Amino acid sequence: MHIAKPESKPKPRRLLGLSQAVIAIGAVGGLLLAPPAFGQLAFYPISPAADRALPGIVFQDGRRAVARTALGGGYVMQGARPPLFELLFEHGILVLAVPQGGCTGAISGS
């Protein structure tokens, strides 16, 4: 007696969902790996210790605050980018590229 096995074709919905996930991950990865060496950068603390250390770190090397980020606790800064991996792994601060005008509101007195 021979039992026919069902064909295992990938469903179009699964392929569409998978391709959308790959595109989204690639876009986020591109933002993570592509902040400019100088310009507007968003600094996001990703741990409580990073939240406390963030002001002391981001204002070094002549950077100045431009605005608060749309997501809580972060700053949009203007100036030179510090080493990305040092910020992420030693301090828990994520740095992303910010398009011009991509901030929530200016910080007065900076």
Image: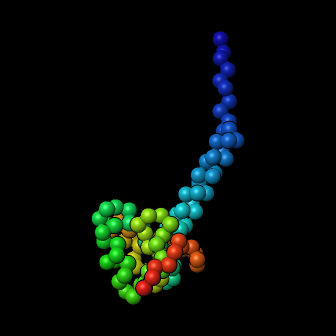
User: Which residue is drawn at the image coordinates 44% and 64% (left, top)?
Assistant: 72
Residue 82, image quadrant: bottom left
Name the residue located 67 percent from the left edge and 47 percent from the top edge. 16
The type of colouring in the image is rainbow
Furthest-bottom residue in this view: 62
Image quadrant where one finds the C terminus = bottom left
- Residue 96 position in % (x across, y down): 49, 70
Q: Position of residue 84 (x, y in %)?
A: 41, 73
15 sits left or right of 69 in the view: right
**Would residue 37 be seen by someone viewing this image from the given angle?**
no
Residue 51 sits above or below residue 59 on the image? above
Residue 86: percent from left, percent from top: 35, 72
In the rendered image, residue 97, in percent from the top left (x then y), is placed at: 52, 73
Residue 28 visible in the shown view = yes
Give the left or right position of residue 93, taking residue 17 as reference: left
Rendered-image quadrant of the N terminus = top right
Q: Residue at x 37, y 81 (%)?
A: 59
Instruction: Name the residue nearer the viewer: 48 or 13.
Output: 48
**Numbered label tally:** 0
Q: Nearer the viewer, residue 15 or 56?
A: 56
Q: Residue furthest front?
A: 108
Q: Residue furthest top?
A: 1
Rendered image quadrant of residue 54: bottom left
